[in-house]
Image: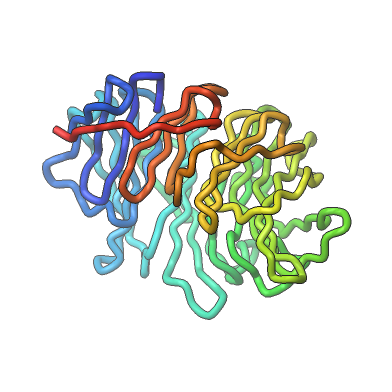
Amino acid sequence: MVTSTQGWALTKDKVLKTTDGGQHWMSMTSQNAPSYAQAKGTFIDMNNAWIVSAQQTENKVTIQHTTDGGQTWQATSLNVSDPAGVDMLHLISTDGWLEVTASPGAGSQGAYIFRTNDGGQTWKQISQSGSDGGIGNGGFKSGISFMNAKTGFATTRSTTGQPSDPGLYRTSDSGANWEKRSLTPPTGLTVEQMGTTPPVFFGNTGILPVYIVDSKGQQRFVLYRSTDSGANWTSMKVGDFEGDSVYVLDPTHAWVSDNNSGKLYYTSDGGTTWTASQSQTGKVNEMSFIDASNGWATTDGKLLHTSDGGQTWTSVNYTIQ
């Protein structure tokens, strides 16, 4: 969502827009649109949007861009071997990055990182997992993020096979080379597995979602915080729940769903304390918040809305035109 009434949505075969808070959706899908079964959108405002989709059987990735709210789309194709999935496209001014993942193997997954420096007109592969200076092949990739044009992070969501390896990499040269980073386990917790998803930055302050399996096999969730541009990370309070979908709004507000219990948790103090929602949301696929009070969430069959910061959720009766 871009405002309390305006926003975008992406299904497996449609690009949608709403102007009334999600009650009515209008298709802005291009006439020759590719499949969006493996796709991610970057929706900047109501005019500018990017959609990246992987066509695995054709060994290509399609990048679509609109500057007129979806009335017209420009498309670019990248030739990629075995593109099983894509991360959302990340833009900082005219610089941009894209991670494309290959089919997963036995505890490993390859990845390619592409870069543009002309606003998305042209793209060049700058890194490949397993190569010199690249991220490792171990574990299943969960995406990338950049805090500025030089400094970025790549993450691995599932175990890399080593309790001390969170699958976190940092670049300081715009993604050409990546350095593995470590995390100090939370105090008093024996970690068996650790995974991460891309950190979100607000100036020099970063919030990093971390997924932990302890020595008893229990899944935990914790936010790590950095105040020095991601050079060092400190653990906040460990939540006694299984984290899955996460949305970080700012350094203090975040929401995370626990697919195991069907509950959704929220924090307003940067992860020092967590509170369970009064509503049973079920498995949440995606979330979007425009401020600390108003947010939307999608499940397999519903669109949900909260106006009280996630304490309660109501279903939105919507139609697609």
Residue 254 appears in the rendering? yes
Question: Residue at position x 77%, y 65% from top?
Answer: 191
Lateral position of residue 107 relative to residue 91, left or right? right
Question: Residue at position x 32%, y 31% from top?
Answer: 316
Between 218 and 279, the one nearer to me in the picture: 279
* Image quarter of the C terminus: top left
Q: State whether residue 90 is above or below residue 215.
A: above
Q: State whether residue 272 is above or below residue 139.
A: above
Between 76 and 183, the one nearer to me in the picture: 183
Residue 158 on image: x %, y %: 59, 65
Residue 260 on image: x %, y %: 53, 58
Lateral position of residue 36 relative to residue 43, left or right? left
Q: How many marks?
A: 0
Residue 10 on image: x %, y %: 30, 42
Q: State whether residue 18 is above or below residue 61.
A: above
Question: Residue at position x 78%, y 58% from top?
Answer: 182
* Image quarter of the N terminus: top left
Q: Residue furthest bottom?
A: 106
Question: Residue at position x 70%, y 44% from top?
Answer: 223
> In which image quadrant can residue 38 be found?
bottom left
Between 189 and 206, the one nearer to me in the picture: 189
Lateral position of residue 111 relative to residue 81, left or right? right
Q: State whether residue 131 is above or below residue 242.
A: below
Residue 178 appears in the rendering? no
